[in-house]
Amino acid sequence: MNEKLKQAYERLGLSENVSREEINKRFDLLLKRRRSKSKDDERSAPEEDFQAFKFILDSLDEQEISEAERQRLAKYGKLSGVASKWERFFRLYKTHVIVSVIVLIVLAVAGNALYNNWQHKKYLASLPPLDASIMFIGNFGLKDPSGKNDDLNEAIIKQYPEWKRVDASISYLPRSGEGADSFDMNFMQKAVVELAANHPDILILDKATLEWIGGQDGFQDIKSIVESGKIAKDDPRLKWGKNPESGQEELYGVDITDTPFVAALPVNRGDEDMIIGVLADDEVKDKAIALIEHIVGEAAAK
């Protein structure tokens, strides 16, 4: 017990072990005495007694709170002191702690995303340069139920070893009847978005999708295949059309349906035709034409 508390008990003539009930009785008595005083100077005389009562009662409240806290923390055993400090810290800095935790979570998520992105870039950098991107659009589906394109990429490379890396994808475009007007509008919109977003170098389409796209519009002229003698100009598999600007006849597609190349692809196509066309220009166009020549040459040797 500190000295100030001892002095408060002595002033009131109370034992240090007195009960709270007895303290309350003495306090009531002091109030009665004060009300009985008639003069102001006499009323102010016991002010120090009131301060002593207040100090004693405040001390008792603190002791009771401390005892209740001690009993509450007793379940932690030897760690009760640590638990008390942690609770006090969290109570005082709860908002700061919550904000800090949120910041740490955000930083962890962002850091993980950056790390994954770095790992992906590192992986891509370790791969051979991309030879070409190929998109299949039509009533086609992957045989792999997981929907991954890995088997398709591997099959293309296996059929054409001159390429070391290819990025192939399929945009499923089913239809309920004959012709381009039987396509489901949702799938049509999805195909347009994927075509615009991916910018493939090569397209492989079924007949109805080719008609929907608009024939030769957007395709490169690949008649160098005919000029090289790989295929005759009157071969029925060739898709010819006139350039609307120049009026010149151009070869924009080749039907590769009945070829070993198509037969080896892990693609479900039913009875659909497969027509290949080239969108890329410059060096990639030359690579694409070389692929088509290879496919046509395989079919001729079959």
Image: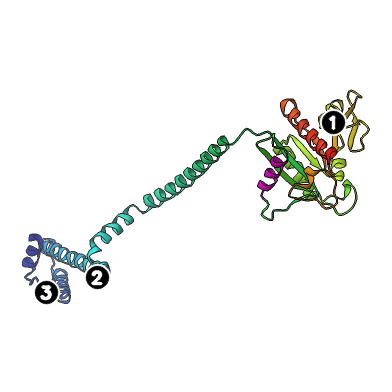
Q: Nearer the viewer, residue 231 or 220?
A: 231
The residue beneath circle 2 is: 71
Q: Secondary structure at mark 1?
A: loop
Query: Whole-percent x and y of residue 112?
Result: 48, 45
Residue 158 magenta-highlighted: yes
Q: CA distance from mark 2 to mark 1?
A: 94 Å
Q: CA distance from mark 3 to mark 1?
A: 115 Å
**Taken as a whole, is the magenta stretch helix, strand or loop?**
helix
Query: Whole-percent x and y of residue 44?
Result: 13, 61
Query: Whole-percent x and y of residue 83?
Result: 28, 61
In the rendered structure, the answer to whether residue 50 lies left or right of residue 141 reads: left
Q: Amino acid at mark 3?
A: Val
Q: Residues within 10 Å of mark 2 (few under 14, many from 20)?
A: few
Query: Whole-percent x and y of residue 3?
Result: 7, 60
Q: Nearer the viewer, residue 38 or 274?
A: 274
Q: Amino acid at mark 2?
A: Gln
For residue 18, which numbered disc appears in the image?
A: 3
The residue segment tinted magenta is 148-159
The residue beneath circle 1 is: 230
Label 2 or label 1, whichever lies nearer to me, is 1
